[in-house]
Amino acid sequence: MSEFGYIPEAPEQSAFNNKGIFTPTDIYNLKQNNKWVKGGAGLELIQSQTVSGVSQIDFTNLRENEFDIHFVEYNIKPSADTQNYIRFSDDGGSSFETSNYIYSWFINDSASGSGETKSTSSSQMYMNYGGGNGTYENHTAYYYFYNLGKSKFSLVSERAVTGSSTGSAHTFLGGAGYRVASVINGIRFYPQNGTSTGTVKLFGIKELT
């Protein structure tokens, strides 16, 4: 039996391009090499939160030592017209940082056209602005978080769609960052006004080489 499921040769591979059969020994060895991930395409659900009427949504079990990239699906209905923010924690959620954020978003409004918002010094990272709370005005987005488990600047990329308070559609494309070389082990999502109801899912993505 060859290495990681191949008979009799063992071409260079990972758990995701394997063409053979994994034995218990193969799985054990892949886990020891940090190359075995449950699920598809390296995506593993860490935590899903379904909330109702909360002022913030915190994730404090990021498993940041296991994953190179984190992915978040965000689907929230706000109780008020609001914009939403993200903050990081480096002490497991005991506190969340209130400075050293940067962001740059490109916005397109179905009624008024396109624009940009940006900052090189902010107390939080903007997720969107001008969001409404009408019947069809959900705030939906996905985010990729990079370097959370490393003593490097942490970065975020985003794509989002919200129903605006004026009844138009807003799309957002951009990124943000935290300009401190720190291991991040907590993420907070929160609205400027009102509360949030919906579901936010946090995944980990392993880079397999």
Image (spheres, rainbow, N blue to C red):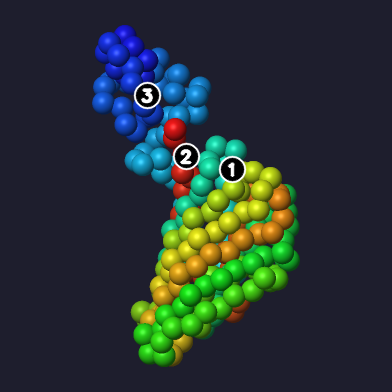
Secondary-structure class at tag 1: loop
Q: Is residue 147 above or below residue 18?
A: below
**Residue with the mark numbered 2:** 206
Q: Looking at the image, which is closer to me, 160 or 54?
A: 160
In the rendered image, the vertical position of residue 55 relative to residue 142, given as above or below: below
- Residue that carries the numbered disc 3 in the rendered image: 12
The kind of residue tagged 1 is Glu
Residue type (three-letter) at the residue carrying disc 3: Glu
The residue positioned 51% from the left and 47% from the top of the image is 69
Residue at 49%, 55% (x, y): give it: 144
Q: Is residue 115 visible?
A: yes
| Residue with the mark numbered 1 | 64
**Residue 134's x, y, as percent?**
41, 83
Q: Is residue 155 above or below residue 130?
A: above
Q: Residues within 10 Å of mark 2 (few under 14, many from 20)?
A: some
Visible residue check, residue 52: no
Determine contact: label 3, label 1, CB under 8 Å.
no
Residue 130, position in %: x, y? 51, 83
Disc 2 to disc 3, C-alpha distance: 17 Å
- Find numbered disc 2 in the image and state the secondary structure of the residue it sits on: loop
Answer with left or right where residue 169 lies relative to residue 50.
Answer: left
